[in-house]
């Protein structure tokens, strides 16, 4: 990249007035890539000025704030207009966006508006010989593509849980720059009529560091309670392969795979999952994979870090109890 190029991060707000976890991960990556240059964060929403201090603590030198009632809830038209205005005025060399539902919707439209190069689902982003180079899984994660950006604005859409979140540093401050953009209600061609959220007691799948997932081998919806118990002890999210979703055992929100979510946790525990390519495409990027299956020839063992051949109905309660004992011992030890 040019020596005069800063790195920008598009912030994705979450409930409670804080950014989503992916934003902190992108800020950490941006600080590494920017080196002595500055990290910019751009945040759009109804009332998001209060995020500036938090973004500064996690590495932003400049926070660009676009505020309007039309920016909440998220719509493509409104956010492309607001974020695009901030980026067009600065023409940054590199823009980092999280590979979330909103990020994957926003990024290609920004690229078209700004005539920018874009690489989606990046597993890594680096600067090599003054070029921005990204890697991304392809062919349902059977291969890794290495892509070099050309000149101009570059947009990298980065997978969650790949980079560690930037740690907070007390005493950091950032320059706050309001984004001047013109928009009225007629510019927003879509509107959100209703949001029907699925209540989950665990963390969202795409942000979870640990996921306990079940497949057809669980035999019925009632047995997902075994996963819930283990997940509660581990502080994990619960997921599913496609067959339990198709059978109506769990909501579609649980599905991991080509037709569901793509996840990248530190630990993925696959329980009664055979390992069809459709499922592997959504979770094979996990750092550690533990597979529990009674069939020693199950394809899931081909990518597992650790494999347990046995009855999932016997192993899960034992594993849950061992985790519980370990936590109790740690608490007793102080």
Image (cartoon, rainbow, N blue to C red):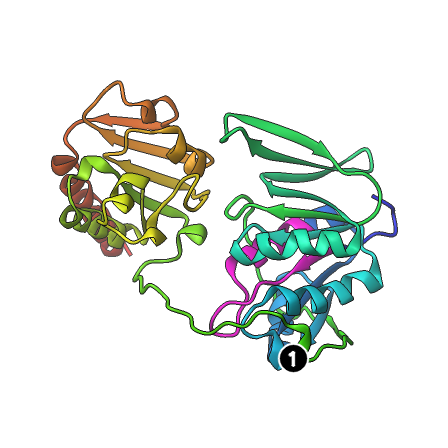
Residue 22 part of the magenta segment: yes
Q: Position of residue 123 (x, y in %)?
A: 58, 39
Q: Which range is magenta?
A: 8-30
Q: Is residue 132 above or below residue 114?
A: above
Q: Position of residue 188 (x, y in %)?
A: 64, 72
In this rendering, the count of numbered labels is: 1
Which quarter of the figure has residue 278?
A: top left
Q: Position of residue 226 (x, y in %)?
A: 17, 47
Check disc 1 and report the residue beneath it.
Answer: 185
Q: Position of residue 207 (x, y in %)?
A: 45, 53
User: On the picture, is 293 further left or further right than 30?
Assistant: left
Q: Residues within 10 Å of mark 1 (few under 14, many from 20)?
A: few
Residue 317 part of the magenta segment: no
Instruction: Name the outermost residue toward the top.
Output: 297
The residue at the point 28 percent across, 23 percent down is 298
The residue at the point 60 percent across, 35 percent down is 136
Q: Quadrant of the N terminus?
A: top right
Nearest the viewer among 35 and 287 is 287
The residue at the point 53 percent across, 70 percent down is 18
Nearest the viewer among 324 and 161 is 161
């Amino acid at each position: 990249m040019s020596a005069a190029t800063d790195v920008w991060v598009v912030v994705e707000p979450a409930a409670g007035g804080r950014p989503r976890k992916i934003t902190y991960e992108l800020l950490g990556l941006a600080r590494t890539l920017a080196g002595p240059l500055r990290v910019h964060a751009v945040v759009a929403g109804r009332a998001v000025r209060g995020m500036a201090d938090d973004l500064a603590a996690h590495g932003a030198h400049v926070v660009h704030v676009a505020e309007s009632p039309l920016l909440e809830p998220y719509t493509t038209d409104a956010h492309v207009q607001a974020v695009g205005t901030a980026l067009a005025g600065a023409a940054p060399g590199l823009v980092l966006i999280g590979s979330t539902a909103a990020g994957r919707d926003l990024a290609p439209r920004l690229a078209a508006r700004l005539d920018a190069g874009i690489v989606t689902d990046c597993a890594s982003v680096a600067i090599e010989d003054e070029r921005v180079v990204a890697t991304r899984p392809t062919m349902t994660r059977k291969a890794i593509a290495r892509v070099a950006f050309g000149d101009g604005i570059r947009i990298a859409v980065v997978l969650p849980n790949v980079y560690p979140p930037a740690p907070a540093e007390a005493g950091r401050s950032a320059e706050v720059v309001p984004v001047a953009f013109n928009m009225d209600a007629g510019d927003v061609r879509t509107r959100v009529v209703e949001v029907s959220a699925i209540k989950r007691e665990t963390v969202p799948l795409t942000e979870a560091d640990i996921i306990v997932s079940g497949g057809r081998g669980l035999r019925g919806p009632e047995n997902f309670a075994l996963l819930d118990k283990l997940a509660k002890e581990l502080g994990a999210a619960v997921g599913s392969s496609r067959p339990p979703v198709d059978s109506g055992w769990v909501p579609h929100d649980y599905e991991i795979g080509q037709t569901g979510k793509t996840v990248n946790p530190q630990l993925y525990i696959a329980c009664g999952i055979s390992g069809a390519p459709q499922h592997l495409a959504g979770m094979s990027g996990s750092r550690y994979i533990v597979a529990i299956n009674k069939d020693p020839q199950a394809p899931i063992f081909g990518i597992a870090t650790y494999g347990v051949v046995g009855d999932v109905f016997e192993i899960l309660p034992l594993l849950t109890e061992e985790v519980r004992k370990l936590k109790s011992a740690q608490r007793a030890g102080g």
